[in-house]
Image (spheres, grey):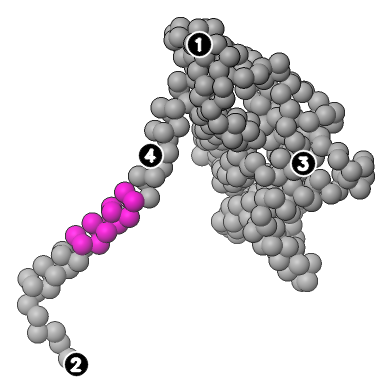
Amino acid sequence: MATSTMPLGALSRSRRLKNAGMTVVIYGAFAVAVIPLVWLAVTVVVNGIDRFFISDAEGLDAGFNLEFLQQSMRGVFGSEPAFGGILHAIWGTVMMTLAATVISVPVGLLTAIYLVEYGSGWLKKAITFFVDVMTGIPSIVAGLFAYSLFAVVAGPGTKLGIVGAIALSVLMIPVVVRSSEEMLRLVPNELREASYALGVPKWLTVLKVVVRTAIAGITTGVTLAIARVIGETAPLLVAVGVTDSMNFNLFDGRMMSLPVYIISEYEKGVLPCNTATCIGEITQYRAWGAALVLILIVMALNLIARLIARFFSPKTGR
């Protein structure tokens, strides 16, 4: 048997050098990945926070205020800094995302349960194939699908909040299915067998043992699905359109969302001022402010998901 002629000290030194080199490479890759994220976050905060300090008619700072969150764009023209907000966009985003979640989570979770616990044969393979296909479809295709569906049912040109919710649900369902399926597969079979040994039927075992054990991962997957769609612009432009007014009815009229508001305000550019003290870039301030609020909403959703996962987790649940 051949033996290495390299001294033990030299071998250890070589391993330490390789370990140090790979450590530098890993930390460097981490820095390369984090730098754009930090730069984006800082840019949004620096530009977005300015909008919350422009409140009076003269365009002068009047301290921090929440008027930007309490107004809509109804009747706002030009670039007067004292007027115009995102209240209608916030409500539209929350309502359409909530409706899409209500549609997607039951469908996605039940599909995942079927694939893991009950599925077999050609039907399981077909569902898996279509879920994989849906995962990679462009978002604009989801918007065109929802718009076409309601054009056939309710007539051409139909743009409603529920149409946008359905478009978002098409994007959410495959994410929920995939994440829930992986979490359910991680549940040890011993837990299932122990439940069966006690005489618990399969459906109750799935509900009380399998889903309960995987609830933390399922909640995280749902949060990822919401984060996946809450910033979508293209499907909502096609399916819902644009409006400047408040709308609390998903089944009546167009609705505004934060992503659509951001792009519609930013593309206006620098508008001509009507007064000597008017700030022409106020439309861009509105866009950056809306972007900051959107990021804060996503962060709040992640925090809520973590709290729910911690509360219902088997180790700390009640």
3 or 4: tag closer to the N-terminus: 4
2 or 4: tag closer to the N-terminus: 2
Q: Residue 13, relative to residue 317: is it above or below?
A: below
Q: CA distance from mark 1 to mark 4?
A: 34 Å
Q: Which residue is mark 2?
A: 1
Q: Position of residue 282 (x, y in %)?
A: 53, 22
What residue is shown at x 56% (from left), y 22% (from top)? 272
Q: Which residue is mark 4?
A: 39
Residue 70 lies within the magenta run = no
Contact (Cβ within 8 Å) of mark 3 with mark 4: no
145 displayed left or right of 179? right
| Residue 262 showing in the rendered view | no
Q: Which residue is mark 1?
A: 276
Range of residues picked out in magenta: 20-32
3 or 2: tag closer to the N-terminus: 2
Q: Which residue is mark 3?
A: 239
Q: Quarter-wise, where is residue 194 in the image?
A: bottom right
Q: Quarter-wise, where is residue 77 in the image?
A: top right
Quick one: 248 or 116, which is closer to the camera? 248
Q: Position of residue 19 (x, y in %)?
A: 21, 63
Q: Position of residue 278 (x, y in %)?
A: 52, 14
Circle 3 residues within 10 Å: few <14, some 14–19, many ≥20: many
Q: Residue 85, relative to residue 132: is it above or below?
A: above
Circle 1 residues within 10 Å: few <14, some 14–19, many ≥20: few
